[in-house]
Image (cartoon, helix red, strand yellow):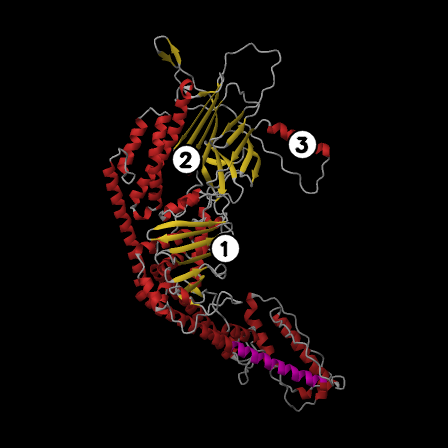
Amino acid sequence: MPCKEGNVRGPDEADIQDEVLLATTDLEPEPEEVQYTDTSYTSASFESLPPVVEEPKTKKKKGKKRAEETVEVVKKTSSEAFQWSEDSLPLEQVAKVEEEQVEEKKKGKGKKGKKEKEELPAFEKPNNWKKMNKKERENWLQQRIEEWKAEKEAEKQAILAGAKEKRAALARERAELMARDNAEQDIRRDILAKTVNLFQKFEKQKFAYNRKKQLESEWQQYLRCDGLPDPRVVTQMNTYIHLWRENELCDDNELNKRCQEVLPMLEMLEEFVANSRQYTALQAKSYNEVRIALREQLSNAIQLASFTVLRDLEKRFQWDSIKLARYQREFNGLRLNLWVAVPLPTRKPKPVEPEREPVELSFPLMKVAVKLPKIIDGSCVCVRAARSMIDLLSESSRSFALAGEMPNRYEDLFIFNVKEHVATYKLKKEQDEIRTKFYKEIRDKIKEVEAFLKANPYTKNEKEKDELDNLNMAEPPFLPDPRTFIAEENERAFAKYLKTCMTRTRAGEINLRKYRICSGVLNLDLLITPPQSKKISGGIYLTTLQIPKGLQAMKYQVQYRAPSPPPPGVTRTPEEIEAELKKVEAQYEKLALVCIDLPQDVMWTEPPVICQWQETRKLWTSNYVNDYKFNEDKLTVQFRTGVLWPIGIAALRYGNMPYQGWDIRSDPNSKGVIITVTGVCLTVTWICIANTVKLKWIANATTPALRQHFDKPYSVKRMVQIMREAACDMFPDFDAHNHIEGTCPKEWVMERHLYHAMAFLSRAYQFQWSRWNMASGSRNIVIQLRESVDTKREAKFQLLHVTPQRATILKCIELSQEFDTEPAIGLQFYPDLFTLNMSYGSVDARRATFNMKYRLVETVFDMLQELKLCSYS
């Protein structure tokens, strides 16, 4: 930097060595230009001066450092000894000096010293642009540039002011939202807690009623004294199963006795397991273990009885001829048919053996026909056809049971809101700390930049000014609304739960979460006839002992898969098509042909899937099923198979879903509640009376299935079992969203609480589905309701909007063009539907709500929990 005025020293002064030449930096002001003053010399005397030649810089040496510093200072002081004015120089010389200064600046700063040229917008020229001279144009352009800079600066200041105002508004909004949330939580602690206590009180009364009823049934069973165990007492059931296993005798008469005893026990145990919540965990586990052991023992008894019957063809079979014998008997829940071709004494083979004729069998009792392939020798074959009305195989499959229990299945809405409120407050506090830390860092940086600008007032500092503007407009990283973030976390958790419930299946494997085996299991077996007893003298029978005592399957397994059709665009000649058909027919001749008349006790709304049980892997597979044909008019199926394994007829579980509509209203002819649900194919109506539910009507039914159950009272769990067995499953499990398209899973705690409130209000209000519900999201339920206490003065339907935090009546209606969550005018805050009715409902509606009996409330509540109307409509 140049020395300041008044401090110039001569080269002969002693302290000249303390002077150090410092390099300029970007933060220091630009070096001042040399000023020339008036002297006694004329400007003409400098015209003949030669240009100053810069001496090349020599490499510094350590030994001459002090001397070089002295020389530089001497040169500097000598050049500053004279100051000349620009007026004393000619114009050419002034231009040369300015050019030299510019070159020195460029050399000193290098690349860092370059400054980007400010881009100017393309200004619109005035109308008189062509009439303006060059000077006028320059003046107009300069004025326009200054105006543009002023506008840009005003815009920047407006942005800064707007950013500060927006920041303050967001802070006020967050504070107001949290204050309102705290106020609403205080209301929930008051009235929602009381509502939840009322709901839990009714549930406990129902459990107590069921326990009392069970004790009465135990006493009645004790008084009956029929020698049978009581399924409610696990110790008695264990004793019964143990004695059954010790009994080695099991013929068809014993099997008939066991079927009559066991099937009612299994039905009761199935209901106990379904209602496991009213028992302790140990009791529920014991009931399930006894149920599985009883099913296994029944399956073994069927096998052993078939073996015992086959051991005595002479006495137990009907002989159509000397070569053919058959056996058929119908048990409780079981039909058994046996067909045996008795081998005759061997004869001398003929020179040319005739072609074998295929064996064709018909079992009218089960409406099944089988045509065996020619590769099976029909002269010594044994075929068993047994149809069990209950499925004893599927439960051992890995895809049968629900993979995971719903995490918060029985959590009440008040506890749910308390947890969310605590989590929301905690998350808001963490976000406030992040914002506070961010703004503190910004303030510190602003102070540093302002201090720098204050220390360097004579420089432009465009970079620092831009940095200061950016700091003033800086915003913290995006932080979501705590409530929204928690809701998204819940949605992700439920999506993860659904993912854990998905079962990966092999090729051809039937996923029992998506399909259900209906109308029992058909066993078609090729068996080896066990050795028969032979009578000898003295009334003695001699029999070959077979170990182990059981049925032995005849070896027959042909796996064939028909070729897929040619890709589109590929043409084949008639000869190629005929050759391929002959090849396929030749392969089909090696397979068994099975024809089955579908049972009429199943609602066949879609073509069923034929599958076979693979014992080694414990699964149902369709890999051996070929040439499948379904006759919808006659309800018959025909297929070919290369193995004779147990056959199952699988129906799509949720083929009638999602719901197309539903309605809940009071029954005018009784003190019950009518529930009507319209699915894709069927419309089903139930009526809930006291602690039972009755099947009232099924519209659009394809078969007379379930008609024998009309107007018969059942418990809710038993009704679910009956309808699932008939392939009319309208009771989705929690993982059904994986298998049904067009569903909207709702927050289960909110949905379950709403069902309980609807059960309380079911005699005072009519509820219907809404078209706005599906697209409203997981934390919003939209349904229609209206008071129905006085049927002569029925009001119009209104939209009810329910969230985990509140329940409101909306201003819009079902027929509105757009959906709007704006509540009705003058409606206050209500945490749920039940409290909304206490203030918003009429006197008659409130009276009808409090006159509800706990048995009817809990029955309707259980039905709604099984149907899950809000998540599937």
| Measured Cα–Cα span from mark 3 to mark 2 | 41 Å
Location of residue 863 with respect to 329 vertically, above or below: below
Residue in the foreground of this view, choosing between 106 and 752: 752
442 inside magenta stretch: no
Amino acid type, residue under disc 1 in the picture: Gln
In the picture as drawn, the residue positioned furthest to the bottom comes out as 40
Main SS class of the magenta portion in the image: helix
Q: Nearer the viewer, mark 2 or mark 1?
A: 1
Where in the figure is residue 867, as x and y percent of width and height? 42, 52
Neighbor class of circle 2 (other Cα within 10 Å; few <14, some 14-19, many 20+) is some
Location of residue 209 with respect to 800 vertically, above or below: above
Residue in the foreground of this view, choosing between 322 and 352: 322
Residue in the foreground of this view, choosing between 243 and 473: 243
Give the labeled residue for mark 2.
Answer: 392
Q: Secondary structure at mark 2?
A: loop
Give the labeled residue for mark 3.
Answer: 580
Neighbor class of circle 3 (other Cα within 10 Å; few <14, some 14-19, many 20+) is few
Residue in the foreground of this view, choosing between 339 and 5: 339
Q: Earlier in the sequence, mark 2 or mark 1?
A: 2
Q: Magenta region: which residues?
A: 137-160
Proximity of marks 3 and 1: CB atoms separated by less than 8 Å: no
Location of residue 52 with respect to 784 vertically, above or below: below
Q: Secondary structure at mark 1?
A: loop
Amino acid type, residue under disc 2 in the picture: Leu
Amino acid type, residue under disc 3 in the picture: Glu
| Measured Cα–Cα span from mark 3 to mark 1 | 46 Å
Q: Nearer the viewer, mark 3 or mark 1?
A: 1
**What label sits on residue 660 in the rendered view?**
1
Where in the figure is residue 295, as x and y percent of width and height? 37, 35
Instruction: Choose top left, top right, bottom left or bottom right for residue 260.
Output: top left
